Image (cartoon, rainbow, N blue to C red):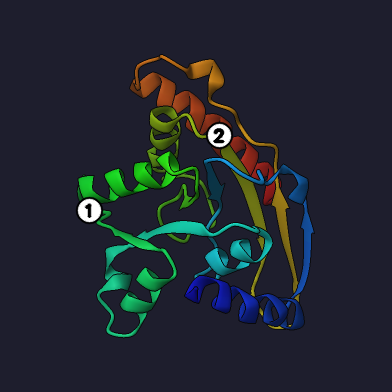
Amino acid sequence: MLYKFAKAIFTPLGYLIYRIRVSGREHIPKDGKVIICSNHIHGMDCILLAIFCKRQVFYMGKKELFERPILGPLLRRIGAFPVDRGATDMKAYRHALNILKEDKQLGIFSQGTRAEDFENVKSGVAVFALKSGAPILPVGIKGNYRPFTKMRVQFGEPIPMTQYEGQKVKSELVDEIMEEVVCRVSALSS
């Protein structure tokens, strides 16, 4: 409920404040599980992406955000959940897989934090995709989030996991998938 309310407020504000150009919306699956993977340049990225997705996006966020008195409960109410980036967080891992098992949209930033480059990419996107069979929807965001400047959001074609069905989750396979994801997200955001 709060998610729909927040989206109803932020959608017109987003268009009013930024000159948003979006392309590739036809690639966003209308139903079924999907992992939305974008570059992460600003704290507002999750809001910007949610504007264009008709279904709710459940985001994984650093646990420190959820420790703040007002922000933490608000994030939980809109479907976000915490992850401890400094350890193997099995609770967040299981929660993410359950979201996908319920045929929902999981939002993850492959860099794990805001960054201009793709040097320290995390492997979670590929692991979740392999474990769940969910396709990965690459997205590129470009802009500086200054009011009244251009922002560009470009959705790419989903990367299906059907070719990997039945294979064990090995580091070589994870690296192969992440290389393709990074290549596509990088191209979409340049």
Marker disc for residue 117:
none
Please identify the quarter of the rendering in which residue 65 is found.
bottom left
The local crowd at label 2, few if under 14, some if 14 to 19, many if 20 or more residues have their Cα within 10 Å, is: many
User: Which residue is more in the foreground, 136 or 53?
Assistant: 53
Q: Earlier in the sequence, mark 2 or mark 1?
A: 1
In this picture, residue 85 sits left or right of residue 14: left
Query: Mark 2 or 1, which is nearer the eye?
Result: 2
Say what amino acid the circle numbered 2 marks.
Pro
Q: Residue at x 28, y 80 (%)?
A: 68
Instruction: State the residue position of label 2.
Output: 135
Which of 68/182 is in front?
68
| Quadrant in the rendering for residue 18 | bottom right
The location of residue 12, given as percent across then percent down, is 72, 80
Q: Is residue 58 left or right of residue 36?
A: left
Q: Is residue 125 above or below residue 22?
A: above
Where does residue 35 sit, x and y in percent of width and height? 51, 43
Say the numbered circle drawn on residue 86.
1
The image shows a total of numbered marks equal to 2
Question: Percent from the top left, x then y, of residue 119?
Answer: 46, 44
Q: Residue at x 44, y 44 (%)?
A: 102
Report the side of 111 relative to 38 (left or right).
Answer: left
